[in-house]
Image (spheres, rainbow, N blue to C red):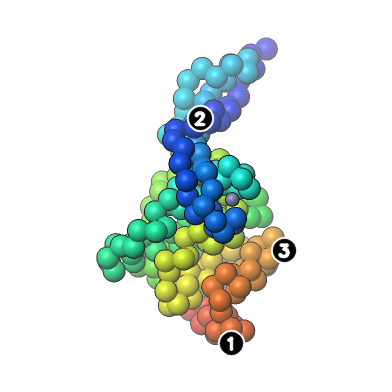
Amino acid sequence: MIFIGTMNLTRTRDVGNFLCPACGVAQGYRLRASRPWLTLYFIPTIPVGDFEFFVQCDHCKLRWDDSVLEMNHPNPVMAEENQFCDQAVRAAMLVVLADGQISENEISALQRISQHFWSRHVGRDELGKICSNAQQNRIEAANYVLTVSRNWNQEQRSRALQGMFLAASADGPLDPSQLAILAKMQELFDFTDAEYHGAIEQALEWES
Ligand SMILES: [Zn+2]
């Protein structure tokens, strides 16, 4: 019997200091690169995917998207909107994956939502890549949004919430873990009850 499997090999590519969003102060970090390998008898033989990068805080050990390192560099308006669209798609993917699965309905919903709320065409291959990156790096949805939403304005936050909500509910009722993430967004985005409910209501109107 031949034992074939896969494993992720992770290496440190860089070290430095960054403002850790969880610790709230400057901490050391390691920039880590992980890559899936095919294993034969549990020994990695050939790489089967691209490198994916994440940043790990030396103190709290939480993992962050590598964009956490750029949080202190403001961009021009257009670049900011483009960056927002990319981040919103990724955030919605993380919320969808919070229940441990992704369905055909959810994939096509993510594509429609990206187009409508973020004016961003996302191909299936791109979604697949975002999905495998998310599964490899295990960055939690709320931690990801906490990092990237610092640069989002109020209107972008509202659009991000709407997309995340619709993507997560594309395939029937929300899982408790997804509900918890969406509820946490109110606090992260500093929304009043009225602002939060207004955004959700508006999202439901688009869907119907
Ligand atoms: Zn930390």
Closest to the observer, 24 or 130: 24
Q: Secondary structure at mark 3?
A: helix
Q: Nearer the viewer, mark 1 or mark 3?
A: 1
| Residue 64 locus on image (x, y percent) | 53, 49
Closest to the observer, 178 or 3: 178
| Label 2 – label 1 distance at C-alpha | 46 Å
| Residue 66 locus on image (x, y percent) | 45, 47
Q: Which residue is mark 2?
A: 11
Q: Which residue is mark 3?
A: 176
Answer left or right for 137 relative to 79.
Answer: right
Answer left or right for 26 relative to 114.
Answer: right
Q: Earlier in the sequence, mark 2 or mark 1?
A: 2
Three-letter amino acid code at the position of disc 1: Ala
Q: Nearer the viewer, mark 2 or mark 1?
A: 2
What is the crowding at mark 2: few (fewer than 14 residues within 10 Å), some, or many (at least 20)? few
What is the crowding at mark 3: few (fewer than 14 residues within 10 Å), some, or many (at least 20)? few
| Residue 71 locus on image (x, y percent) | 42, 58
Q: Which residue is mark 1?
A: 194
**Residue sitting at x 52%, y 43%:** 28
Confirm or deny contact between disc 1 and disc 3 (CB under 8 A).
Answer: no
Residue most toward the top? Answer: 1
Visible in this render: residue 123?
yes
Q: Quadrant of the N terminus?
A: top right
Closest to the observer, 178 or 109: 178
Three-letter amino acid code at the position of disc 3: Pro
Confirm or deny contact between disc 3 and disc 2 (CB under 8 A).
Answer: no
**Residue sitting at x 59%, y 63%:** 168
